[in-house]
Amino acid sequence: MEMRLHEGDSVALVATARKVSPVEVEPAVKLFESWGLRVIVPEGLYAADCQFAGSDRHRAAMLQELIDNHDIKAVFCVRGGYGTVRIIDSLDFASLDSFPKWIVGYSDVTALHSHMATHCSIPSLHATMPVNIPTDAVSKEYPAISSLHDFLFYGGLEYHFPVGTSSLPVCGRVGECRAPVVGGNLSVLYSLLGSDSDVDTDGKILLIEDLDEYLYHVDRMMMALKRAKKLDSLKGLIVGAFTDMHDNAVPFGRDAYRIVLDAVAEYDYPVAVGCPFGHIGMENLPLPLNAEVGLVVSENEISISL
């Protein structure tokens, strides 16, 4: 399925969750325009209703219009926060199967990714969002931005992450597989269990990442996924960044990565730990969801490729 962008294509910004200001998205508009894209900023993007970018009805209508506009080739969710789940049941994704376009974002946007993986045939893109784009993005190279550009315009993807450096604490579990990737933010996946947006993990590679959570709650969420049989039939597990974790006065005793590894200890599929996906600023690399990738985990390196 051809979904590459080309110079002159139209892309759009949308706010599905927390409100946003013009100054927060201006660097992204300039960046996308420097790529030769025509950037659509919908009327009402900067609406506000408490913490949300306008009412639920307003946000749903804004996204629906962009989904149904066949001239728009990609929709960038401007930020996460909370709120996408409040509009997900009001949306109709049917036109995307005939007129595919990238829906791009991460964190709270996991609600869209998960719902699309269940109800659409096209992939979506777990990647950095406009509010993350720094003011010098046009003149300075950042991994999250250069890799996003290359993926959107040229397709293909090949990552090699050395184990035992930077934030990669352990290898995880060696092995290899090839399967579609699903998932995203662990807290959002946990909140979708049993709903119409609950993701099917059977025969899939699951991606998880999270931010600003207590360690005991990471364990609670992993136990919920395990008891819901979401971990039983995986082909592989990609563990992204678990950023700014918290502990109680009585320490939980394990960090987030160890909690995840303990939850999947009884299985034999490959587990890639500490990959650069999630809340890690300009290190957050793009990864297509609902698309088949190859995962190889060795003692020294993690490889992910389309």
Image (cartoon, helix red, strand yellow):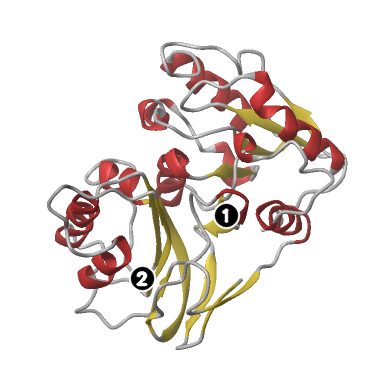
**On the rendered structure, is 178 left or right of 133?**
left
Instruction: Mark 2: give few (<14), some (14-19) or many (20+) Cα within 10 Å.
Output: some
Q: Quadrant of residue 205?
A: bottom left
As shown in the figure, which amino acid type bears the numbered disc 1? Answer: Asn
Residue 96 position (above or below residue 126): above
Residue at image position (44%, 11%) is: 49
Query: Mark on residue 284?
Result: 1
**On the rendered structure, is 200 left or right of 146?**
left
Q: Separation of disc 1 and disc 2 at Cα? A: 25 Å
Instruction: Mark 1: give few (<14), some (14-19) or many (20+) Cα within 10 Å.
Output: many
Residue at image position (38%, 80%) is: 270
Mark closer to the observer (1, 2): 1
Residue 239 position (above or below residue 279): below
Query: Mark on residue 257?
Result: none
Residue 146 position (above or below residue 271): above
Tag 1 secondary structure: loop
Residue at image position (28%, 83%) is: 268
Tag 2 secondary structure: loop
Residue nearest the viewer, comparing 88 with 304: 304
Disc tally is 2
Query: Mark on residue 203?
Result: 2
As shown in the figure, which amino acid type bears the numbered disc 2? Answer: Gly
Residue 229: x %, y % from top left: 20, 63
Residue 303: x %, y % from top left: 55, 78
Q: Quadrant of the C terminus?
A: bottom right
Residue at image position (39%, 30%) is: 82
